[in-house]
Amino acid sequence: MTPTTADRAPMAGMKVYNLKLGMWVFLLSEVMFFTGLIGAYIILRFAHPEAFAEPGVVLNVPLTAFNTFVLICSSVTMVKAFAAIEQGDQQGLQKWLLATILLGAFFVGVQIVEYTILTGEGFVPMAESYHAIARGAAEGSAVIGGPLYGATFYTMTGFHGAHVSIGVLCLCFTWWRARKGAYTAGSLGGVEIMGLYWHFVDLVWILLFTIVYLI
Amino acid sequence: MATGEGHKAPPYMMVFGVLAVLTVLEVLFAFTGLPKIWLALGLIAMAVWKAVLVALYYMHLRFEPTRLWVMALAPVPLAIILVAVVIKEIFTTGSGF
């Protein structure tokens, strides 16, 4: 049930309404989840630098940089959707939510294309079939890195991609409810917490992109 | 209390501009050929800057009660400890993984 203004009366302790507090607690658990993944990657990279590659050698940095920009744009459209319903603009809410859905789906699509290309080039997480070479190198060139690189890459970006995909589905549900007029200027908690999740997904990708693709 | 009440609208488009510029700068910086340690520090600094902007303005943390700030920042020292302590272990005992 979307909270009304009365339902969103802040609790005595945290001074935020229950839905928002619940979403923040969930996001903090997600912070620890991704810290475990990214932390493990950093530690393995320090311990076995020969198993990884320099930026741009195997991974497509320009494509992913563009995809990062797409995700940042989706954060803008999400915040515009929230700003619209704060003013009671139903059409604006639906428009910007739809834009966010399309941009999020585009991001996932580009990731799938990237995975397809990388696996075709031998960049896989399995030791017996790993044979990644430098981008643009001739067939038969020296293998770059090892399966540890592939395993950590697909684990981190795969889990993030799953979060984005689930976010897109939740956004579709939010958009559907917006079309039924479920949200108003005095009853917008559902849009706000959806925005919190989506911005968190963007925030994690900002860090992932830097650590995995650029360092 | 809904976010947005009691304060003027955050500068969403200005933040977007900063995020876009920082993304371009990050990519360019990554290929400057600087020593690895300076590259890593510079890139992490830019990434953290972007993440903080998203948290403060898009997630509206800047306008939330202090108690929520404390809660949101709670995992940060835990994350730093996790990574820093194990990396120190690697350097003091060798890469015996």
Image (tube, coloured by chain):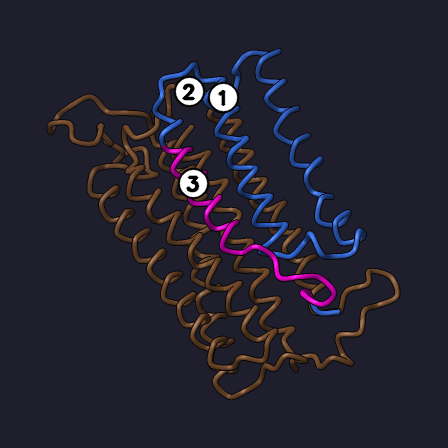
Chain colours: A brown, B blue
Q: Identify the residue shown where x is 49% and y is 17%.
A: B37
Towards the viewer: A154 or A126: A154
Say yes or no: labels 1 and 3 on the same chain. Answer: no
Q: Any mark on residue A46, and which?
A: 1
Please rate how many residues cluster around mark 3, counting C-alpha atoms within 10 Å: few if below 14, some from 14 to 19, many from 20. Answer: few
Q: Amino acid at mark 1?
A: Phe
The subunit letter for the residue under badge 3 reads: B
Residue A94, placed above or below residue A33: below
Of the residues shown, which amino acid type is indicated by label 3?
Val
Does the magenta run of residues contain A125?
A: no
Callout 2 amino acid: Pro
* Magenta span main SS: helix
- Which image quadrant is residue B39 in? top left
Where are the magenta residues, as a range?
A: B3-27
Q: Quadrant of the C terminus of chain A?
A: top left
Residue at the location (65% across, 31% down)? B80
Question: Distance of mark 1 from mark 3, alpha carbons?
Answer: 30 Å
Looking at the rendered structure, whether the residues under marks 3 and 2 are on a common chain is answered as no
Residue labelled with disc 3: B21
- Same subunit: marks 2 and 1: yes
Q: Nearer the viewer, residue A135 or B56?
A: B56
Residue B77: percent from the left, percent from the top?
A: 71, 35
